Image (cartoon, rainbow, N blue to C red):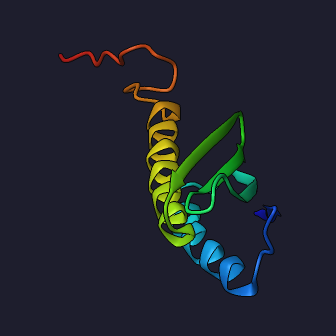
Amino acid sequence: MNLTVTGLNLDVTEALREYISTKLARINRHSDSIISTTVTLCTVEKSKHKVEADVHLAGKDLHVETIEDDMYAAIDVLMDKLDRMVLKYKEKSTDHRATPSGRETVTQQD
């Protein structure tokens, strides 16, 4: 998985990068089809922090954004939202049919 962390109007510290990568490890365990992730950190106002994430899955692109008072709290809320979206996509993409062909198998009894 490729991870890109960028900052708009703020410097991205190594602590923020490490925090984001540890939080993304949980999401990476739920889905093996994550190709790349881009996380953008920015400040909206003096006390508001906005975090956006674009996740490229095999067959789907997800976009999530949050605004919170603290940067770490915004990252936590973002990862929770992203985790729910990835799980929802994974459940939708699984095949729920009983047989691969879609037909029921009929057994003959003597």
Q: Nearer the viewer, residue 49 or 84?
A: 49
Q: Who's the residue at 54% across and 49% down the image? A: 66
Specify the farthest residue to the front.
Answer: 46
Q: Nearer the viewer, residue 12 or 110?
A: 12
Eyeballing the image, is 37 above or below 109? below
Eyeballing the image, is 105 above or below 74? above
Q: Who's the residue at 59% across and 45% down the image? A: 65
Eyeballing the image, is 21 above or below 6? below
- Residue 106, by quadrant, is top left
Q: Is residue 90 left or right of residue 4?
A: left
Eyeballing the image, is 41 above or below 84? below
- Residue 40 appears at what percent x and percent y? 74, 56
Q: Is residue 106 left or right of residue 49?
A: left
Q: Who's the residue at 55% across and 62% down the image? A: 47
Specify the farthest residue to the left.
Answer: 110
Specify the farthest residue to the bottom.
Answer: 15
